Image: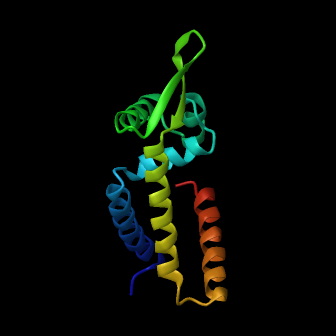
C-alpha cells in the first residue's frame, strides 16, 4: 500500500497530464492559462504579475511574449514610457481561457459526481490541513 505522500505524487502526475491535455487542446500551456486567469483578475502589468505569481521578470516576459504571439493578449504602453505595459486579453485569449475553465469544471464534476457531499467536504478539509502543514515545514 502506498503512503499518503506517494499517493499525492501519483495523483499530481495524473492531474497534470489531464490538465496538459486540456490546455494543449486550447493552444495553451498550464502556466499560460494560469497567467491569463491572473490578467483577467486585473493583475495586468509585469510588476503586478511578478508579485502575484512569484515569477522572475525574465520568465514572465517570455510567457507574456508567447501569449501576445499567440494572439491571446494585447499589450499597450503606459504614457510615454514604452517599457511600462498593460496587458489585456483578446477575444481569442478569453475564449481559450474560458474553454479550459469549462473543461476544468467538467473534470471536477466527473471526478466527484459519485462522492457524497460529506466526503467531498472531508477531503477539502484534509487537503487544507495538509497544505497548512506543508507551508509550515522547514525542509
In the image, is 119 to the left or to the right of 28?
A: right
Residue visible at 66% across and 80% down? 121
Q: Nearer the viewer, residue 16 or 82?
A: 82
Q: Nearer the viewer, residue 2 or 115?
A: 115
Q: Is residue 44 above or below residue 29?
A: above
Residue visible at 64% across and 68% down? 128
In the image, is 137 to the left or to the right of 35?
A: right
Q: Specify the quadrant of the image occupied by residue 26.
A: bottom left
Colour convention:
rainbow
Q: Is residue 52 above or below residue 76?
A: below
Q: Is residue 50 above or below residue 9?
A: above
Q: Specify the quadrant of the image occupied by residue 13.
A: bottom left
Q: State the image coordinates of residue 88 (x, y, percent, origin top left).
A: 54, 35
Q: Is residue 85 above or below residue 106?
A: above
Q: State the image coordinates of residue 71 (x, y, percent, origin top left).
A: 39, 37
Outermost residue to the top? 80
Residue visible at 58% across and 29% down? 47
Number of labels in the image equals: 0
Q: State the image coordinates of residue 122 (x, y, percent, origin top left).
A: 65, 82
Q: State the image coordinates of residue 19 (x, y, percent, origin top left).
A: 39, 63
In the image, is 133 to the left or to the right of 99?
A: right
Residue visible at 62% across and 87% down? 119
User: Which quadrant would the N terminus be assigned to in this image?
Assistant: bottom left
Amino acid at each position: 500500500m502506498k503512503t499518503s505522500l506517494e499517493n499525492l505524487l501519483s495523483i499530481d502526475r495524473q492531474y497534470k497530464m489531464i490538465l496538459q491535455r486540456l490546455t494543449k487542446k486550447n493552444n495553451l500551456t498550464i502556466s499560460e492559462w494560469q497567467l491569463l486567469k491572473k490578467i483577467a483578475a486585473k493583475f495586468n502589468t509585469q510588476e503586478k504579475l511578478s508579485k502575484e505569481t512569484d515569477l522572475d521578470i525574465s520568465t514572465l516576459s517570455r510567457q507574456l511574449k508567447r501569449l501576445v504571439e499567440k494572439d491571446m493578449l494585447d499589450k499597450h504602453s503606459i504614457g510615454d514610457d514604452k517599457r511600462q505595459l498593460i496587458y489585456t486579453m483578446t477575444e481569442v485569449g478569453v475564449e481559450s481561457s474560458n474553454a479550459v475553465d469549462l473543461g476544468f469544471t467538467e473534470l471536477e464534476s466527473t471526478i466527484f459526481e459519485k462522492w457524497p457531499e460529506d466526503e467531498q467536504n472531508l477531503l477539502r478539509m484534509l487537503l487544507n490541513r495538509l497544505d497548512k502543514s506543508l507551508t509550515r515545514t522547514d525542509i
